[in-house]
Image (spheres, helix red, strand yellow):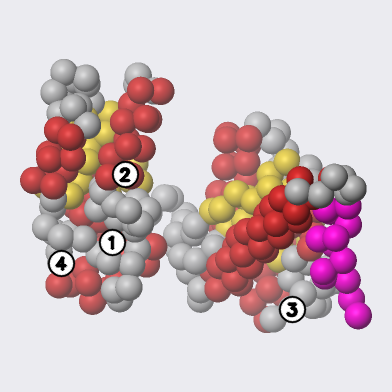
Amino acid sequence: MRIALDAMGGDDAPSINIDGALTALAQAEQLSVDLVGDKDVLSSLLKEKRLLTGDYPEDRLRIIPAEGFVGMEEKPTVALRKKPNSSIAICWKLMAEKKVQAIVSAGNTGASVAAGLRTRLFLKNVKRPGIAAVLPTLKGHCIIMDVGANPAARSDHLYQYGVMGAIYAREMFGVENPQIGLLNIGSEDGKGTSLVREANQFLLASHLKDQYIGNIEGRGISKGEADVVICEGFVGNVVLKVSEGMADMMFRVLSEEISAVLDTEKTNASDAFKKAASRYEYQ
């Protein structure tokens, strides 16, 4: 498999992207990578890592030149018009020409989606792209989709996310019969917006009906109530960012309390957890 990597996209690019590519090449002999971006910058970095020649055959690690990149703060559609040969645009061009089988980018999400839509390279019967994120649960993993690609979804889009999410769960995590839930403000039928109510009926009548467990609330995600949770991109992105923020906060709080315990002989680890929990007790 050959992958086009948007080497200029994301935080700390392109150095960290090159490191990731080299790590992947070392771990997967069947993999080839096209580094897409500023040719001079990428060549210089590879020379610094002493990996420009000799370490990998030329056909496994190539540099594909691009003109500029879409910054994280730029409006995707405007940036793509101004920079038709940016790194993410060239990645999608390679895909459209069937020169690569996949694209990877840590850059501007909107630009990645918009550039892909321009190519019209849609999967059969899939009308809108969706971004899948994997969240940890008490039972393993949960795939939530969409987390930001399509904030104005229709009920058939949510159904398509269910199909794609189930395939992801089965192929990547070995879940033989993935259970699919629809994110809602309540588990009862009739709850939620018109979109969610319509999607619920759509799924109940679809070929996914045996895997579909119905509406689930946000807390059901971390409990592992479903292997796949589907929602429109706006809601999914909020769930993802809140989850990331909560996890970061809890790690920081526990780190502070455990560090304090290590400095005090009269306390133990359980005291640290109790003290951390006491910070957030309802008054």
Q: Nearer the viewer, mark 2 or mark 3?
A: 2
Q: Residue 83 carries which label?
A: 4
What residue is at 56 percent from the left and 53 percent from the top?
133
Distance from label 2 to label 3 (Cα)?
Answer: 41 Å
Q: What residue type is labelled 3?
A: Gly
**Spatial separation of the CA atoms under disc 1 and disc 3:** 32 Å
Residue 180 drawn above or below residue 51: below
Identify the magenta region. 270-283
Tag 4–tag 1 contact (CB < 8 Å) = no
- The residue indicated by pointer 1 is 115
Quadrant of residue 269 in the image? top right
Indicate the amino acid at tag 1.
Ala
- Let me know if residue 128 appears in the view: yes
Inspect the image, locate mark 4, and give the three-letter code of the amino acid beneath it: Lys
Earlier in the chain: of badge 1 and badge 3, it is 1
- Residue underneath mark 2: 17
Q: Main secondary structure of the magenta part?
A: helix
Q: How far apart are marks 4 and 1 (CA)?
A: 11 Å
Residue plotted at (32% across, 53% down): 12
Toward the left, the furthest residue is: 40
Q: Circle 3 sits on which residue?
A: 192
Circle nearer the N terminus (2, 1)? 2
Measured along the vertical axis of the image, is residue 201 above or below residue 191? above
